[in-house]
Amino acid sequence: MFGYYIIIGAVALVSWLVSNTLKRKFEKYSKVHLRNGMSGAEIAKKMLADNGIYDVEVISTPGQLTDHYNPKNKTVNLSESVYNQRNAAAAAVAAHECGHAVQHAQAYNWLQMRSALVPVVSVTSGMSQWLIIGGLVLGGAAGVGLGWWVAVLGVVFMGFATLFSFITLPVEYDASNRALAWLKNKNMLAPEEYAGAEDSLKWAARTYLVAAIGALANLLYWALQLFGGRD
C-alpha cells in the first residue's frame, strides 16, 4: 500500500499545483477588460450564431468554475462570474463551452464517444476501488475464488473511468482550439486579450491531462496488485 500512497500523493500534488496556477491565471486575466465591452454571455451567443447554432440557450449557473455545456438540453451554462463579466478570462471560458456546442452540432466523434460512456462511468466509477479492495480481502490476490472475480470486475470498472478520462482530452483540447480559432478569426479580442485567453485555456486543459495521468496510474497500480504475482 505504501507505493499506492506515493502515487496518489504525487498526483494530488501535481493536481494542486496545476489547479492553483489555473486559479491565478484566471484572476490575472479577469483584470484584462475587453475593449469591445462584451460580456461572457454575449461572446457565447455570438459564437453560437456565427456557427449557425440557434437551438442552444446560454444561461447563468451558480458557483465558480461551474461552466459546462449540457448536450441533453442544449444549454451553455456559464458561471455568474463568466456570464456577466467582460474580460479575457470570461471570453475564453464562454468560447470554450461554445466549442462543445459546436462539437455537438457537428457530431464530433470524440464527444459522441464520451457521451456514450457517461452512463457507464456514472455507475461504475464509484464502485471500482471498493470492488478491488473487497476482492483482495476475500482472497483475490491468490488468483482464485470469488474474491479474484470481484477484484477483476473492479479493475474493469476502473478501466472504463480511465478510458473516459483519456477520451475527455481530445474533446477538451478541440473545444479550446475551436474557441481560440473563432476569437482570432473574428477579431474578437485585442492581441493582449487573446494572449490571456489562450494562456487561460492552456492551463485549464492541463487539469484534464493531470486527471487522466492520475487515473491511469491508479489503474496500473491496482492491476499490478492483482495480476503482478501471477505466472
Image (cartoon, rainbow, N blue to C red):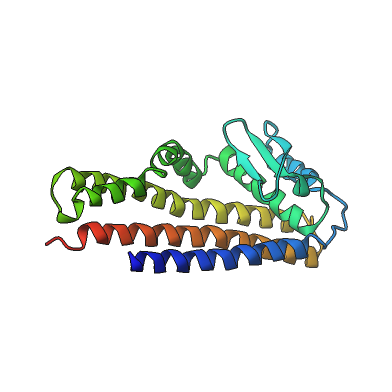
Total numbered labels = 0
Query: Which image quadrant is residue 207 in?
Result: bottom right
Could you say where residue 78 lies in the image, as x and y percent from the top left? 71, 43
Examine the rendered structure and indicate whether residue 144 appears above or below residue 216: above
Q: Which residue is drawn at 56% across and 63% down?
A: 206
Q: Which residue is drawn at 70% across and 41% down?
A: 48
Looking at the picture, tell me which residue is in the foreground, 24 or 167: 24
Looking at the picture, tell me which residue is in the foreground, 38 or 81: 81
Examine the rendered structure and indicate whether residue 46 appears above or below residue 196: above
Residue 68 in sight: yes
Direction from residue 99 to residue 11 in the image, left or right:
left
Q: Quadrant of the C terminus?
A: bottom left
Looking at the picture, tell me which residue is in the foreground, 129 or 19: 129
Looking at the picture, tell me which residue is in the foreground, 153 or 109: 153
Q: In which quarter of the image is the N terminus?
A: bottom left
Query: Which image quadrant is residue 191 in?
Result: bottom right
Direction from residue 100 to residue 194 in the image, left or right:
right
Could you say where residue 185 lies in the image, as x and y percent from the top left? 73, 56
Direction from residue 32 to residue 111 in the image, left or right:
left
Residue 194 in sight: no
Could you say where residue 210 lies in the image, as x and y percent from the top left? 50, 62
Direction from residue 63 to residue 123 in the image, left or right:
left
Q: Which residue is drawn at 85% across and 59% down?
A: 33
Query: Which image quadrant is residue 187 in?
Result: bottom right
